[in-house]
Image (tube, coloured by chain):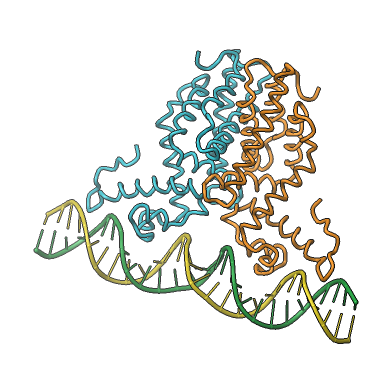
Chain colours: A cyan, B orange, C yellow, D green
DNA sequence: GAGTATTCTTACCGATTGGTAAGAAAAGCG
DNA sequence: CGCTTTTCTTACCAATCGGTAAGAATACTC
């Protein structure tokens, strides 16, 4: 899904692989030190490149950031058949993602660091994260409304509020998990939280 | 509680006020652009100083950061008579803090930005936030255990897990609130969540 | 008003930043 | 092999970074 370009005519071929390596490395290092705290030379060095060599593939630091964010979205999309039908599956896939993320510290760092950093208007990823949260909340609200109509939500659970809480719990748990060196059981705490919204637990 | 120093002998007096202004400004700007994204010149300029003028009061950028974090802790301590007796009051004070914070964007930005940024070992505030979360979780767990013994928690609520969830919801809601320009009702969503842990709602 | 700390500025430092210019290496095609 | 395109390096740039040195202002005490 990512580096599929068959060796183009001319003398391409190698470019795609290098690009992929750069993006992967960028995800790692942006996660470790944030966008502002990372230099192109850092990323390039870990790829065995000089920084102008990197800039040949991505014209600007900002372009590389957006490529990194986009790629992580693709990966997530692959892991999750989420967009089938809303409902219990949507919630279950959140827990699944949390479980998978516990083995991908780099990606968790990337999102935790950048979502907070991009809070400030003027940050290159500001619009990206605004859109991301908007659509995330919309999807979740929809799924919860479906569950409500099916009578699967406990009394007093408001879909829009619950959606915000779910997203918040996921984000917040990631920060704790990152800070305590992986001790926090993200998937467990999330599942526990979700079960408190539902009439019947997620996984029997 | 902050600038109480009565004009010291010699030719001091002004120093304390300047220091306070610097710290307040630092809180603002660190919040907007993070620690790594902020320059001492930015902060100094907004204080009507040059950056060496700032460095006279705080020997290093890191020292200023710690001063900013410490000051915010003081302010929080003042707002909250939290440490009286654990129990419902502890939870109620969280909602109160959320409500107050909705009028202090700078401080919310500071903590949201820095807690994520400091996730990386090697960040100057890494230890600070590790300790902060540790004690926050410990206090909350204690309060919830008290509530459990008093039979005020719903069935299946585990104090340690719930503590993590509460902290996570607070943190996560702040990011959403920052991103959507204050539309998220932090205090409301938090109170709603807390009520789902309790047998009887927080405020009748 | 003289003297003395305190507070702040101008000028500078070496290091690092993102980005550019120009050309060398490498790889495929005929 | 020669030619072309892609890929990457060396060398450089102006701007900015945190921090230092040294002295001018300022403000208070006596």
Q: Of B95 and B105, which appears nearest the observer?
A: B95
Kindly identify the residue that appears in the image at 77 percent across and 24 percent down.
B202
The number of numbered badges drawn on the structure is 0
> Is B136 left, or right, of A179 in this rendering?
right
Q: Of A192 and B90, which appears nearest the observer?
A: B90
Instruction: Give coordinates of residue B17: x percent, y percent.
Output: 79, 61
Residue B110 lies, with reference to residue B143, above or below; the image says below
Residue D17 lies, with reference to residue A185, above or below; the image says below
Instruction: Give coordinates of residue A97: x percent, y percent.
Output: 47, 29
Instruction: Give coordinates of residue A138: x percent, y percent.
Output: 57, 30
Residue B112: quadrant of the picture: top right
Residue A106: quadrant of the picture: top left
Residue A9 lies, with reference to residue A152, above or below; the image says below
Instruction: Give coordinates of residue B94: x percent, y percent.
Output: 73, 34
> Is B2 left, or right, of B111 in this rendering?
right
Kindly identify the residue that appears in the image at 70 percent across and 46 percent down.
B105
Residue B116 lies, with reference to residue B90, above or below; the image says below
Kindly identify the residue that appears in the image at 83 percent across and 58 percent down.
B5
Kindly identify the residue that appears in the image at 65 percent across and 67 percent down.
B51
Q: Quadrant of the N terminus of chain A?
A: top left
């Amino acid at each position: 899904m990512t580096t599929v370009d068959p060796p183009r005519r001319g003398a391409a071929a190698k470019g795609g692989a290098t690009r992929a390596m750069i993006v992967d490395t960028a995800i790692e290092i942006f996660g470790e030190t944030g966008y502002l705290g990372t230099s192109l030379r850092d990323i390039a060095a870990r790829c065995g490149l000089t920084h102008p060599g990197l800039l040949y593939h991505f014209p600007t630091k900002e372009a590389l950031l957006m490529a990194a964010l986009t790629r992580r979205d693709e990966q997530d999309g692959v892991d999750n058949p989420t967009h089938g039908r809303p409902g219990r599956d949507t919630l279950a896939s959140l827990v699944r993602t949390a479980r998978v993320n516990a083995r991908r510290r780099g990606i968790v760092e990337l999102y935790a660091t950048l979502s907070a950093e991009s809070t400030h208007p003027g940050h290159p990823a500001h619009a990206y994260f605004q859109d991301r949260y908007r659509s995330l909340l919309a999807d979740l609200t929809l799924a919860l409304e479906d569950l409500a109509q099916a009578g699967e939500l406990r009394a007093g659970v408001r879909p829009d509020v619950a959606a915000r809480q779910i997203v918040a719990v996921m984000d917040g748990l990631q920060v704790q998990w990152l800070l305590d060196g992986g001790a926090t059981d993200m998937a467990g705490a999330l599942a526990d939280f979700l079960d408190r919204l539902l009439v019947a637990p997620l996984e029997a």
